[in-house]
Image: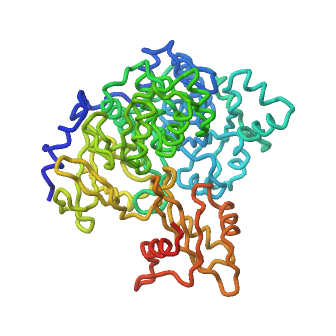
Amino acid sequence: MQSSNSAGDRPWVASYAEGVPAEIPAVTETLLDMLDASVAKYGKHTALEFFGATTTYAELGELVARAAGGLRKLGVQAGDRVALALPNCPQHVVAFYAVMRLGAIAVEHNPLYTPREIRHQFEVTSPVVAIVWDKIADVVSALPEDARPAHVVSVSLPEAMPFGKRFALRLPIAKARKAREAITAKPTAKGIIPWSRIVEARRISERVPHPTLDDTALLLLTSGTTGAPKAAILSHRNLRSNAAQGRAWLPGLHDGEEVVYAVLPLFHAYGLTLCLTFAISIGAKLVLFPKYDLDLVIAATRTSPPTFLPAVPPIYDALARASNHKRIDLTGVRFAISGAMSLPVATVTRWEEATGGLLVEGYGMTETSPVALGNPAGPSRRPGTVGVPFPSTEIRVVDPDDPTQDRAPGEEGELLIRGPQVFGGYWNAPDETVAALLPGGWLRTGDIVTMSEDGFVTIIDRLKELIITGGFNVSPTEVEQALMLHPDVDSAAVVGLRRPSGGEDVAAAVVMKPGAVFDASALRDFCRQHLTAYKIPKKIVQVDELPRSQVGKVLRRTVRDQLLQLGAG
């Protein structure tokens, strides 16, 4: 049974900001068409800025064509997977669209993952080429044969910097050496190809072949709605639609004039869409930061002040504090969209006092490309909620045990989403796809919510046991397995503990083997050998036993309650 809200009757449309349509026109262009349109229209405008070095849209189009030619010489064909494991940098943008130009599939990876994590992800998607940060090129080259791509391409960040920055990094002083070691390293393994050789190739003048809207453009590794890491399949239609929905949501933007700050990683669904596709679609200047660093952002605002800033609550808080201390002028930021974790009302107040602009919260998942709901960018917004469905997006709130039964407004239930941004399933994982996608194209989010009479959604809890920390999904099972590799750990349970500022901390309860000495610091150090930094538990507590169900399953909610009682929160 389906509620009237899920079909033609959409009460939330009445709350849309002025000028926002109920529906977006069906997209007709792929991501490649989108890029070409911006290159043609905004050719002389700056497309990318990196430590002050700029690239125009015309230059970006030329670099993409040359990089596509270089990848084609390596044998990349339509449908092949190309792994990208890069910080935010111009080469990342060029590589992404070069893959699109060949009709191939980009697979985004966190370049800070451990060798074990990278190996697992490569085993899932089998990339033929990996374009990686030079600091991890040797790691990727040393992967076992069944996970190693045929070719590894190494990207040096300093090569994209202005001459003065490159020269300063080469100075024979300790500060320069430390800065150089933080952002670059010379690969030593044989056969690694420098990125410069890729972009020196003859440009591809023809699209060979032209991707279609329903072709897969991107695979994003995610813990999904069930906890096991898998690759979400996102088509050109999914990603182009979400960029168009974002543009429709903010009618006050001026195409060809906006300055967008990429402080979020492009390998994350949120940063990828808001920066890599949305910003390019409107002919914006995209200012790239290899990582979020307050001093770098402050320096950039002096020459290219932002007008649109997608970020997460801790970044907004830090920038607002810097503004209060007169270190940064944020008055040009008219729009800001927060995602990936809950947005405290206090953060909204601080930000809007500092900027005079709007800060609204959105909601989404990797499986929705990623944005599906947002607070209206106007007086009807409702802080404390995640807003209402985007244009061309439908939602339902249902009984999580029987998703055919809808909940009444105000009643708790599982959120379902349907729209052109909803993904096509998981790569080579039909059972997980069937579990996530219901008949009719409805995505099960695993989030327990309430919906008001007029369509505003409030997140209550999650059916899935994923932990969201710093905007990233962490599978408790993966962290538990890493802990239990330690010879002194008998069993472990990992949960998320909510922070007042939004998001969660990864926390663990461990049972030690008889005679073993508990040392939380040593366990965290051990985890660093197997997990990237954000997955390492901030709190580890020893317990005598873990609470289990009658069939022996660890009761993570009970563990969470116990940790809170022990003061771990």
Asked where in the image residue 410 lies, by quadrant, the reply is bottom left
- Residue occupying the point 26% across, 37% down: 391
Q: Residue furthest right?
A: 172
- Res. 266 in view: no
Asked where in the image residue 557 lies, by quadrant, the reply is bottom left
> Is residue 272 left or right of 370 when viewed as pictured?
right
- Res. 453 in view: yes
Above or below — where is 304 with respect to 499? above
Q: Residue 175's spot in the image, x, y percent? A: 80, 36
Foreground: 300 or 64? Answer: 300
Total number of numbered discs in the rendering: 0
Q: Residue 497's spot in the image, x, y percent? A: 48, 64
Above or below — where is 500 with respect to 284? below
Q: Residue 32's spot in the image, x, y percent? A: 44, 28
- Residue occupying the point 64% across, 41% down: 132
> Is residue 168 left or right of 13 when viewed as pictured?
right
State how the image is colored. Answer: rainbow
> Is residue 9 left or right of 68 when viewed as pictured?
left
Q: Residue furthest front?
A: 325
Foreground: 267 or 249? Answer: 249
Q: Residue 205's spot in the image, x, y percent? A: 52, 19
Foreground: 169 or 499? Answer: 499
Rendered-image quadrant of the N terminus: bottom left
Foreground: 172 or 77? Answer: 172
